[in-house]
Every structure is written in structure tokens, then in C-alpha cells.
Image (cartoon, rainbow, N blue to C red):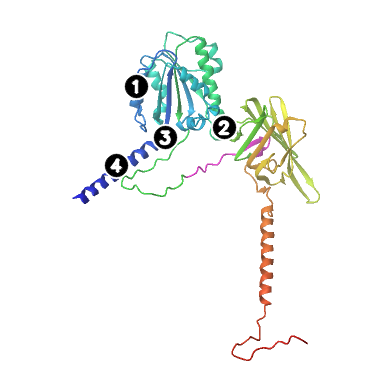
Amino acid sequence: MAEVRMQGLRASAVTFSSLLLTFFLISSCGAHVPLIIWTSKGSLLPVEPPVAGHILSWTQAHSHLSTALGSAPHTVLLFLQDKMSIDDFTAYGGVFGNKEESVFPSLEASLKEASSQLVLPEISWPVAEKIPSLLQEIVGTSPLYINPATLKEQNLPSADPALLVIGLPYSSGVQTKEVLRKNDEVIAEVLQVMKDRDLPFTAVYTGLKPSRMMENLPVDVESVGRTLLQAPAQDITTKAPVIFNGTQGPCIMLWAEQLNVSFLRNQQWSEWVDLGPLTFNNSVSLAGSVCNETVSRLVLNYANVLSFNSLSLTFDMSRKFFPVSARNWSTLDQLEILYDQQLATFIGRNIYSPAEYSYHCQRVSNTRDPLLFPWNTSDSSNQWRITFTDFQIQGFNVTGSFSYASDCASFFSPGIWMGLVTSLVLVLILTYGLHMIMQLRTMDRFDDPKGPSITVPQAE
């Protein structure tokens, strides 16, 4: 009887563990977006918080927001970010005690000063895309998309309901922290305008889509043991190169996995900023680029990068004939960085390839193993750090695609030479040891204890 009871308890424990595992997998997989609401005056009607791990649907989100905004101020500020996930607050919000590293100081201060607040950590992705329509239905007015820079000049009604939508960007990679910090500054600027006008408001901060998506895994209640998970497939989409078209078609091509730059300001290096997403999305301006038979000049123009109003990268290439090799060679002579009317110039060394080929290098930098060197020590080139990863450029004989790549790494690299020399030393040691072993000779006479003893005379 006791044995049957123990088996029943074990079966109940296994079933309960399976249900817990199922709930955990369902709640942790999928794509969802958080939503934060707070008011300056008044209060949000109490809403029962959703169960941990529960993702709100359209009906549930509508019910929660309708109830919460029932008595809140009717001027609603919707800060709509392109992408957002709860992991952004975990990674960059200083939740582990490093409050000085948080990129949301203004948001945290606003939530502390708010008369009431509500956090919905998980809203399904399709619902998040329709948040403006949902708020329009609740508030009863059409959304007004505004620019934070011109908000001070607009007349905002204090009595009539209003839905003001402020779009905020999002960028993945090394720029995420800087973009989120700038978004927090925009939120602080808008809220300060509302406070200066003494207008009560309700602020909503959310995103259109999740910034980090988790792969939906099939749930098997019966299998609760250890299993091997296949690594998620990587995105193999290749970015299109930058192509500058001259009078006779394409004449300059550029591609790189990353174009990282960093600037020294107030004796501190800024974080690395990857210009790749801004370069290879057909939005970068190539104004100022020229090309002919002997000279090619590619200019990449950016705006609002590293707190500069304008920034441009200029690649100067030339084509020269060398009698020793009896062929034309293409060289990257210099790289110029023009930022807010200031110029930093770098000279390219050992950046060359046959004129009919393209040049490729896994790493082009001015730091470790540099290929770019400052023009002189008196200009601002020492305030820049540059690292181009998987860099490829061609300034002559362009036919619409890259020609054969002449790589910066020679066939016999230092690592290959070290391996060859080490192997040669080991082979010599092995040969010498085998030679010594082959020279050993065995004794032809032995001392037999049963036979006559060997007498060794002591004197001559």
C-alpha cells in the first residue's frame, strides 16, 4: 500500500513539473513589446496587473487601456519607438545597481514624479503595431504626429482631448545605447514643454515591434529531459555595396561588414559607432564623389552622428603605373574625416592592389596593426579611432560587381612562418634523436656468473 502511494506521489510530481515547464516555455517564447503609462496629474484607474508571463491580446489590451485612461488627463503623449523589448531596459537601464550607466534617467525621474503609473510588460506584436489606432478609439480624436523640435511653437488645446505621437528611432548593434540615450533626452524635452505650459498629460511609451525576437519552440509536455537545441539559423542576407555612378556607369564600389568610428571628447573615448547600417541602406549621400581614369574620390556624407551635425568619410584613390612590375596599381592614398568644419586626415600605407582588381582586407584600422596613419600630429586625427571590418573597395575598372579581390594578407603570413619554423626545428630534433639511436652498439662480451670470471689487470 505504501509503495502504491509513493508511486502516485512520484507521478503527481512529474506531472506538476511538466506543467511548470510548459508554462515557462509558453511565457518565454514569442515576440512581445512592453508598454509604460504614467500621468502628471490625476490618477489612472486601478487595473489588475496581468499574470507573469501572460501576453496581452487585442481585447485584453483594449480593456486595460480603456480602464486605465478612464479618469486620466485627455492630452495623451504617445512616444512610439520603432522597436522595443523588455531586454532593452534590462541591458541599458542600470538594473544591476549601476544607475550611473543607465540610459533612461529622464524616464526614471518622470516615473518617480508621476501621480500614477502602469506597466504592461508583454503585449503581443500585432497589438503593438495598432496602439495608435487603439488610443485613437479610446481618446476619441485623430493622432497628431509632431516633431519635438517644433513642439514649443504649436498651440495645444488644454480642454479638448489630444493624441500627440512622437516617433523615436531604434538601432541595433553598438549604436543601441546611444540611440536609447537620445530618445530619453527627447522624452525629457517634450515633458518639459508640457510642464512649462502647465498642461496635464498622460504619457505612453511603447514600440511598434520587438527589438529582440525569440524563436518559437515546440512544447512537448511528455518530454521533460535534457535535449540538444539546434542553433538558430543566421541571417545570410548580404548587404548591397555602395556604388557611385560616373558619366559612363559605375566607377567606385565600397563594401564592409562594419565601419566603426570613435571620437575622443573631454579626454574620454566615445563608444564605437557602426556607420554600416547608415551606409548600406541606400540612404547615404555621395555628394562630392568624382572618378576618372587616374583618380577616384568616394565621399560618404552622414548627419547627426557622434553628436556632430555633419560628418563625412572621403576615400582618395589613385591609379599609377610602376615600371618594375610593368602594370597599373590602385592605391588608397588617404582617408579624410570632415566633421563640423574640422578635418582629420589619415595616410594609407600598404593599401594597394592591381588596378584591375579590388582591394580586400579583414581589418583596416589606425589602432592595432595600423594601415591608416595620421597625416601629422598637429591636426585632430589623433582624436579618432577607426576600424573597418571585412573592408573591400574598388575605384577603377568597375563593371557593376567587384573584381577578383587582392587580399592584404600575404600567402606567407607571420603565423604561417612561425608554424613552418617550429615544424622545421622539431623535425631536426627528431632526426638527430633517430640518428643517435641508430649509432648505439650492444656489448659483445658479458660477465657469466657460472663461467670463469673476467680478470682485469690493475697494472700494465
User: Residue 175, which numbered label?
Assistant: 2
Quick one: label 2 or label 3, which is nearer the N terminus?
3
Between circles 3 and 1, the one closer to the viewer is: 1
Quick one: label 4 or label 2, which is nearer the N terminus?
4
Quick one: label 3 or label 1, which is nearer the N terminus?
3
Pinpoint residue 335: horizontal percent, then vertical percent: 71, 36
Mark 4 Cα within 10 Å, few/some/many (few <14, many 20+)?
few
Asked if residue 190 lies in the magenta stretch, the reply is no
Mark 1 Cα within 10 Å, few/some/many (few <14, many 20+)?
few
Amino acid tagged 1: Val
Quick one: label 1 or label 2, which is nearer the N terminus?
1
Which type of secondary structure does the marked residue at label 2 adopt?
helix
Pinpoint residue 52: horizontal percent, then vertical percent: 36, 31
Q: Which residues are magenta?
A: 233-253
Mark 3 Cα within 10 Å, few/some/many (few <14, many 20+)?
many
Residue assigned mark 3: 31
